[in-house]
Image: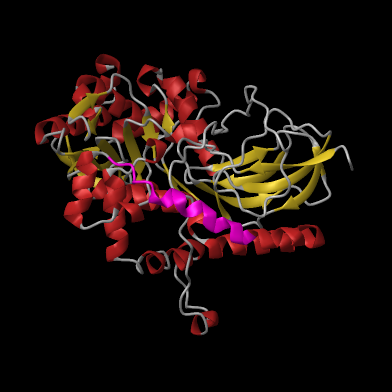
Amino acid sequence: MTNASVREFKMPDVGEGLTEAEILKWYVQPGDTVTDGQVVCEVETAKAAVELPIPYDGVVRALHFPEGTTVDVGTSIIAVEVAGGAAPAQEEAPAAAVPAAEPEKPAEQPAARQPVLVGYGVATSSTRRRPRKQAQDPVARQAASAVQAELNGHGAAPAAPAAPVAPAAPAAPAQRPLAKPPVRKLAKDLGVDLATVTPSGPDGVITREDVHAAVAAAQAPQQTAPAAQPAVPAASAPDRPAAPASYDTARETRIPVKGVRKATAAAMVGSAFTAPHVTEFVTVDVTRTMKLVEELKQDKEFAGLRVNPLLLIAKALLVAIRRNPDINASWDEAAQEIVVKHYVNLGIAAATPRGLIVPNIKDAHAKTLPELAASLGELVSTAREGRTSPSAMQGGTVTITNVGVFGVDTGTPILNPGESAILAVGAIKPQPWVHKGKVKPRQVTTLALSFDHRLVDGELGSKVLADVASILEQPKRLITWA
């Protein structure tokens, strides 16, 4: 087609500062016709699974990567043949991370404003956040070209010799890693080469958490995969039957750590080695709270809403934060300041097939109990379906983790990075309890509050935990204290 051109659709940054994503599923194949806005694939970032729409009409010429491949942001993932010789306005100047085997490009790029789809981070300059893996590793670039050739068939074969061009890009690695002076000092004290650290901060800035994560990875490089092994038999058979015969031939299972699990691991290591954790516990008689839950289920105002103990525990925590606002804060290491938040984005830890995520309810402090119930229901349903958006997991201020659903009495939770407190809720079950001078069976649970001891002292942490316990023992206090 003389009036046709090949457009390369590149992996967008669907979150804030993400550098890579895994292709989970292709919805199109070479030869298929696509239209502007049609979803062509599903990818998993370090925060969520996201569907990617194509921004133009045409015919799919090639899929550059198979399902299960992790691809850097800015790398072309699909080639589409579009009608017309002129390139559409969305075309982005090729980034340094794009494989050398990229098909033909338009000779000129329009200088007009580049419209983009919502959530796509388009780079308008040649500035790079960090050296791309493909630019540093010519062997990996050649492997990517080989995959492209296999997918494209004879049409992609001529592109393979272009791989040797890749070594021209390593000029970028000479760029000095971006890090603030305190972080550079920390790296020097710990013996960490900043050039080997993967940055997670804005614009590719290396943070303290990144340095600590690098130290932890260097100390135990082989421990991550085996640690995940017990989860396989436990998830499939909770009653632990006799080991199947296949265990004799396959004594180990190695699970690649990527996507949500990779991000969670790095965040937890950074949090554990940055914030000094303190955890306090209290055992509570929640019999009256359980009765109130049953009453609310019959209330027409809560018709169709999810009403459970977590709803009242969340409301109790919000009330306790209102009475003790300094608990709702964060530590700014660079500025050496405590940042007190005058709003509460309440995080709810959720276990999903892709790993642990912590979406949050925005401005939970301003919601009525029915509104909070509706938000909780939507949050849980979206998480179970794997459709939690990256924005839903950003900006949290305090978190609740309900380990009681697994039959666990309580735990010592690790803080979500950037937050100062997290409340763990244990299993609610009948226990002998002294009530009005007599031992009676009562509904009892144990709460655990972990907090950052840099900005939350024992008095403040104790007050918050005691307030939550008092409300759950006497839930009518929700009315007087709210």
Question: Does residue 165 belong to the magenta stretch?
Answer: yes
Judge whether residue 414 can be spotted in this image. no
* Viewer-side residue, 200 vs 432: 200
Q: Which residues are magenta?
A: 163-179
Above-or-below relation of 323 to 457: above
Outermost residue, right side = 1
Seen from the viewer's position, the closer of residues 458 and 234 is: 458
Left or right: 83 as drawn, with respect to 248: right
Residue that extends furthest to the top in the rendered view of this protein: 480
Q: Residue at x 55, y 31 (%)?
A: 124
Percent coordinates x, y for residue 130 in the rendering: 43, 45
Q: Does 121 lie within the magenta span? A: no
User: Which of these two is toward me, 220 or 154?
Assistant: 154
**Quadrant location of the C terminus in the rendered image:** top left
User: Would you place residue 302 above or below residue 392 in this image?
Assistant: above
* Residue 452 drawn at (x, y percent): 19, 39
Q: Using residue 186 as the reference point, say whether residue 129 is left or right of it.
A: right
x and y, in percent, of residue 305 in the image: 51, 27
Q: Position of residue 46 (x, y in %)?
A: 47, 46
Mark count: 0
Is residue 342 visible in the rendered structure shown here?
yes
Residue most toward the bottom? 248
Q: Find residue 146 and report its image quarter.
A: bottom right
Instruction: Work out whether 371 lies above or below 277.
Output: above
Give the residue at x 62% y 37%.
93
Of helix, strand and loop, which mostly describes the magenta segment?
Answer: helix
**Relative horizontal placement of residue 150, taking residue 299 as reference (left or right):** right
Identify the residue at horizontal 51%, vertical 19% (top origin).
300
The one of 361 and 314 positioned closer to us in this rendering? 361
